[in-house]
Image (spheres, rainbow, N blue to C red):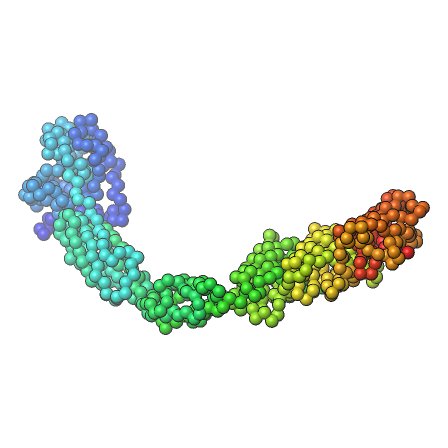
Amino acid sequence: MTPSLRYFWFIFTLLVSLTAGRAVTLTPEEQQLANLLTTASGQQRDKGAMHLDERLVMVARARAMDMARRDYFGHVNPDGNGPNFLVRATGYTLPGTWSTDRRANNIESIGGGYMSAQECWSELMKSTPHRTHLLAQESFFRNQTSYGIGHYYDPNSTYWHYWVIITAPPAPVSALSIASPVAGAKVTSDTLSVRGSVSGGAMFSALQLRLDTPAGAGTWMDLTLPTAAGVGQWTATVSGLLPGVNTIRMRTLNAAGAVAREAVCAVRLVVLKPLTVSVDGAGVVTAGFVGTTNREIGASYKISATPNAGFIFDRWDGIPATPGRDVYRAAQSFVMSEGLALTAHFIANPFPALAANYGGLVGADGAAPGESGGIFMNVTAGGVFSGRLVFAGRNYPVLGRFNSIGEALVIIPRSGLPALSLAVHLDVSGVERAITGSLSDGTATFDFRADRSVPTEAVQFTASFAPDVVSPVAPHGYGYAMVTVRKDGIARVSGVLADGQAFVVGTYLTGEGRIPLHIPLGGGTSALRGNLQITGENMDGTVNYNTPMSATVHVAAGGRYVPPLAGVPCVQFGGVNSGEVTLSQGDLGGDVSHDFSIGTNSRITFAVPVPAGWSLSVNPRNGRFVGRFIHPLGGVRGFSGVVSQRDGTGQGFFLGAAEGGSAVLGAQ
């Protein structure tokens, strides 16, 4: 390279370095001249195809600066180099049929001494050679749609202002790509063959490769740069990949040493080790896992176990221990490690023998409504359970599946409150015929036991709840309940408490003869809770009635109720077809009694004289009686209760003006 060419190349490189990393922007003067070129009314080029080329801009600027600094004006510089040669020297490709003479010019128009772009353009248009070039008035110039504009001002030079316009056919677009390996590929060797392509190779000064491993960035290595202006192929071998993500980086440098094009390809070096998966019992695991297969160390995998008919999944052995891992869950995720061996165990399904309804109480007897509840669930032959939890005055659906050891955890969301955590356990051996567990509300934990319901004969019972003699605020009357038990053990309990609070609920008859009750009342502020115990023909038990004002305990007593045949009274009150109703307390000022007779179809008739305003009837289908009377303090009051076929009595209540009273049916 001659000293003068080195000088021009220094100017060109300086200009390139000043704009490295950002798009070339013309100065206001250059932009005005570019506008005149591209919008001229006589322009014969396709104006839509005309575009600014950054290399042509750099050559045009370098030419303008060179003329000013070396104080000459011409298409050929003092070293004998013309525009064609200087443009080709930057790597820009001109047609091969054009002259290669160092002084040749097929692309440049220049102006000197003009104070503005408009003045420069106007003067150039007066020159036939310049007008022919700039407006492409000859076909030779028509495809010169790439252009560059340069302007340089130096008041110490002869012409002060130097203007350069270069046009040329579009140069091939430069590009760089990595064809192999494919981005994201998994590789198993630490040495790779890499290949790709680069176009416009003559525009670049270097082609480089770097390998970045998980240990850090590598060192740039120079590759052989294809010299063809078109697409050239390159190949390289990289080694030293480490397990994990490795990034292959390619770049080309332009004449100024700045990055021109980049290409990146990330691959993962995987280390494969054998994974052994075996099956114990009747079942299968996810396809492709059984036996010994090679798996990537550190990679995450999912595997699931599916039992055959008549079996259930038991547990996983060998699954990596992680916080919260439940080896009794069939579907698992794990991270592969060396020496890993998994076994899926299956056992005969124990749940068909355990499929039933289960019911029981949560928390302690007598606890406040917010600290007690009831649980009622059905378990299927597949170990799935569903039902409801009654807690703190609300009903919540419960759904889950027991694992092979009969355990499950159900999280129950609550609006505006911490979620409930229900841990349940079913004795899969069948020895303890119950579901046990605990309920946590985030603050306290409450134990529960839900006993198994068993098939039985369809039966009915009536029972009364005696007044709480200890509580000074408890009503004096008897609450009562009517109980219907179906053959499948499902029970329906309905009735009225002595303060007039009615209730109805579905529950179960357990194998121990208990009927668990937990009934939210008063919008959840109160609750009736306890067990009714059936022993032969009798029904007994204790129930707790908690309200915001009091907590009372009531003894339940009753027995089986059998609807009578047609023409037969539903109950005998001591004497034959006769009885007496007695009302007590309830602001009466003393007991009030009246005799009656009970006839066929349980019709009741008062003895003469019939008390004014009184009535009494018994429903033979369920044993409930209702009546009316005129209270001494005024007004008609109602009373109700149930009869007991066990002892030929009836107990109920009525509401007085300030206190409740009892209504008792018995022998005369």
Q: Is residue 227 above or below residue 357?
A: above
Along the line of sight, the residue nearer the viewer: 162 or 382: 382
Q: Residue at x 19, y 52 (%)?
A: 197
In the image, residue 662 sits, relative to residue 124, either above or below, namely below
21 vs 157, nearest the viewer? 21
What residue is at 19 percent from the left and 45 percent from the top?
Answer: 173
Frontmost residue, 19 versus 310: 310
Quarter occupied by the C terminus: bottom right
User: Can residue 52 be seen in the rendering of this structure?
Assistant: yes
Residue 563 falls in image quadrant:
bottom right
What residue is shown at x 20% (from left), y 35% (from top)? 50
The image shows residue 65 at horizontal and vertical percentages of: 17, 42
Residue 548, percent from left and from top:
75, 55
Q: Quick check: 303 above or below 79? A: below
622 sits left or right of 437 in the view? right
Q: Is residue 394 left or right of residue 547?
A: left
Where in the figure is residue 58, as x and y percent of width and height?
19, 44
Q: Quadrant of residue 194?
A: bottom left
Q: Residue furthest bottom?
A: 339
